[in-house]
Image (spheres, rainbow, N blue to C red):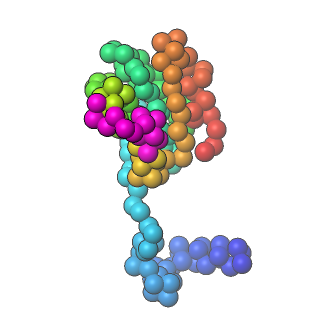
Amino acid sequence: MPTVRRWGKATAARSPQVAQLARRMLGTAGGRTGPGFVPRIDIRGGHMMLDTQRGRWPIVVVVALGLQPGDTEAVADLVERAQLTSGRFRPLFLVDSGELGPFRARSYAVETVMRPETYARVNPQDSYAAYVYERTESICAAYGVRAVVPLSREAVLAGDVATVRLIGAFEL
């Protein structure tokens, strides 16, 4: 059956009429529609990556929580250097800081969560870890994320490019 599927896909790619017939027979309006399909949000990989490379590399969430004021510049710089050495991922940052300038200046996507003390004031009965987990899970679903990488403040302050470079070293 996989051989028939490959042959059908190759034939449909060469002939728009065959692709249209297959969509009508299967009851789908287009290639990526139908029940259960959730469109993904696409992001740029930063200002160093060409737009033609955008769809090729996986999106990786870099979770950098608990940063002090001024640390976001170091995080963005560290991940940018790692991306330049491997070039095989598009970072999406998840931070609890309001300092988004360093990420935006590099054309990186960034999402935020509340700080633990703010969350405790707003929602004292719930767990902050559960909140971060649910937020990360929703981000992964919305963007079609392939991996989640926590980045410690210690690695950022040490400028540990070798460790961060591992993000793009593996085929995800």
Q: Residue at x 46, y 47 (%)?
A: 137
Specify the quadrant of the image occupied by residue 32.
bottom left
Is residue 127 located in the magenta-colored stretch of the structure? yes
Closer-to-camera residue (11/141): 141
Residue 34 drawn above or below residue 160: below
Closer-to-camera residue (23/37): 37
Q: Residue at x 51, y 22 (%)?
A: 152
On-image quarter of the N terminus: bottom right
Specify the quadrant of the image occupied by residue 33.
bottom left
Q: Main secondary structure of the magenta part?
A: helix
In this picture, residue 154 sits left or right of residue 103 = right
Residue range highlighted in magenta? 121-134
Q: Residue at x 60, y 20 (%)?
A: 162
Closer-to-camera residue (94/103): 94
Mark yes or no: residue 114 visible.
Answer: no
Q: How far across and how far down the image is residue 30, in percent? A: 41, 75
Residue 6 drawn above or below residue 148: below
Mark yes or no: residue 30 visible.
Answer: yes
Specify the quadrant of the image occupied by residue 7.
bottom right
Q: How many callouts does the rendering have?
A: 0
In this picture, residue 8 sits left or right of residue 102 = right
